[in-house]
Amino acid sequence: MNWELRIRNYELEIEMKRIYFILSLLLVLCLQEISAQVKKWTLEDCINYAVTNNIGLQRQRLETESAEVNLITSEMNLLPSLNLGSQLDVRFGRSVNASTNIITFNQNMLSSYYVASNIQLFNGFAKINTISANRFMLKAGIETEKIARNTLIIDIMGQYYQVLYSRGLENASKMQLDLSEKQLFRITKMVETGKEALAKQYEIESQVSADKLAYTVARNTASQAVTTLKHMLQLEPSLEFDILMPDLNYMLIIDNSFNTDSIYSIASQTLPRLKEIEFELKASKKQVAAARGAIAPSLSLNGSISTGYFHASGDSIRDYSRELRNNLGQEVYLTLNIPIFNNFITYKNIKLAKIKRKDTELKLELEKNNLYTDIENACLNYNRGKDEFAAANSNYAFNTKSFSAVEKKFESGLVDVTEFSVAKTTLFRAETEALRTKLQLLIRKLTIQFYATGEYENIMK
C-alpha cells in the first residue's frame, strides 16, 4: 500500500512537471510573439512624434531661444554698469611721491583700488526702441517655429496618405491576382476533365503571371512609401515601422463647400506665415527709430570711489588700512556727448534700416497675395475633386456590376479570356481611381481646414 502511494505521488509529480513545462513553453512563445509584433502608427502618432523629435524643429527652437537671449540682453542694457578694479604700480627713476607730491628718484610702489558705475540717462530712445524691436523679433521667431512645424505636419500628412494609396493599390492588385488564380484553378480542373482546351489554361496562366508582377510592383511601391514616411519621422534604422491601416470604406466624404474670401479672412488673422512677417515689419519700424536715436545727444551719469596706498623706498612703513582711509575719494559727474560728424555711419544705419522696413512691407504684401492664391486654388481643387470623386465612385460601382456579369459569362463559356481580362483590368482601374480621388479629396479638405486654423491640433480634430 505504501509502494502504491509512493508510485502515485511520483506519477503526480511527473505530471505536474510536464504541465509546468508546457505552460512555461507557451509563455515564452507568447512573449516572443508579442515582442515580434510591430507597432502600428496612426497619423496622430506620426505627427506627435515628429513635432517632438524632428531635428529641424529642434534647431528652429534654438533660433527662437537665441532671439529670446537678444531680448533679455537689450533689456539688461538699461541697467547701470558696476565695475571693481585694482592696480599695482612699481616705479623706478624719476617719479612723484604720492604722499608729498615731491619729485623723487627712489623706487616706490603704488597700489590703487576703485569701484565705478555708469548709467546712460538718455540716448535718443535707441535702447528702448531696440528692446521693442527684439521683442517683435522674438514673436516673429515663435511664428517661424510654427511655420516649420506646420510645414512638417503637412508633409507627413501627404506622405501618410500616399502610404494609404499605395497600400490600397497593393490590396486591389492582390484582389486581381486572387480572381485570376481562382479562374486558373477552375480552368485547370476543367482541362483535366476534358471540358476546356489546354490553350485556355495557358491564357489564364499568362494573366496570373501578369497579375503577380503587378502585385509585386504594387507591394514594393507600398513598402517604399512606408520607408519614406519612416525617414521623414527620422526614426532609428533598426526600428520596425508600419502604419495602422484604417478602413477606407468608413472614411466619409461630406459635401462641404468653401468660399475663398471667407477662408482668407480667417487665414490672414490666424496663419503664422502672415503673423511672422507682420512682427518683422513692426520690428523693422522700431529699428529705424533706434538708428535715428544715434543723431540725438546722449547723457550719462558716472560715479566712482577710489583709494590707494603709496610706499617709497627709504620711507617708514605706514599703517595700510589708515592709508586707504586717508586716500579715499568719491566723484559723481555727468557726461554729455553731442554727435557732430561720424563719417556718415549714422546716416548709413538709418538708410539701411529704412530699406529693410520697405522690403518687409513688400514681403508682407507678396505673402498676402500668395496666400490668397493658394487658398483660391485649394478651394477650386476641392470643388473639382468632389466632382471627380463622385464620377469615379459611380464608375467603380458600375464596373463592379459589369465585371460580375462578365465573370459569370466567362464561367459559363460565353466570353473568352481576353474579354474577361479586359473587364478585370477595367475594374481595377476604376477601383484605384475611386481610391485616388477619395484620398486626394480628403487631403484637399484638410489643407483648407489648415488654412482656416493654422494649428494641426484643430486639423486632427
Image (cartoon, rainbow, N blue to C red):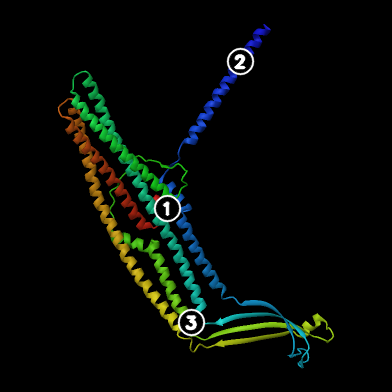
| Mark nearer the viewer, 1 or 2 | 2
- Upstream in sequence: badge 3 or badge 1: 3
- Upstream in sequence: badge 3 or badge 2: 2
Check disc 2 and report the residue beneath it: 12
Q: Horizontal placement of 86 versus 440: left or right? A: right
Q: Residue at x 46, y 66 (%)?
A: 139
Residue 230 at x, y = what percent?
A: 42, 47
Task: Give how far apart the Cα atoms at labels 1 and 2 are.
Answer: 62 Å
Check disc 1 and report the residue beneath it: 457
Q: Residues within 10 Å of mark 1 (few under 14, many from 20)?
A: few
Q: Quadrant of residue 209?
A: top left
Check disc 3 and report the residue beneath it: 293
Residue 41 at x, y = what percent?
A: 43, 43
The secondary element bearing badge 1 is classed as: helix
User: In the displayed structure, would residue 119 be above or below residue 459?
Assistant: below
Residue 161 at x, y = what percent?
A: 35, 47
Q: Residue at x 23, y 49 (%)?
A: 387
Q: Residue at x 44, y 60 (%)?
A: 145
Q: Horizontal placement of 316 versus 443: left or right? A: right
Residue type marked 2 = Leu
User: In the displayed structure, would residue 242 be above or below residue 264?
Assistant: above
Q: Nearer the viewer, residue 189 or 429?
A: 189
The secondary element bearing badge 3 is classed as: helix
Q: Residues within 10 Å of mark 2 (few under 14, many from 20)?
A: few
Q: Residues within 10 Å of mark 3 (few under 14, many from 20)?
A: many
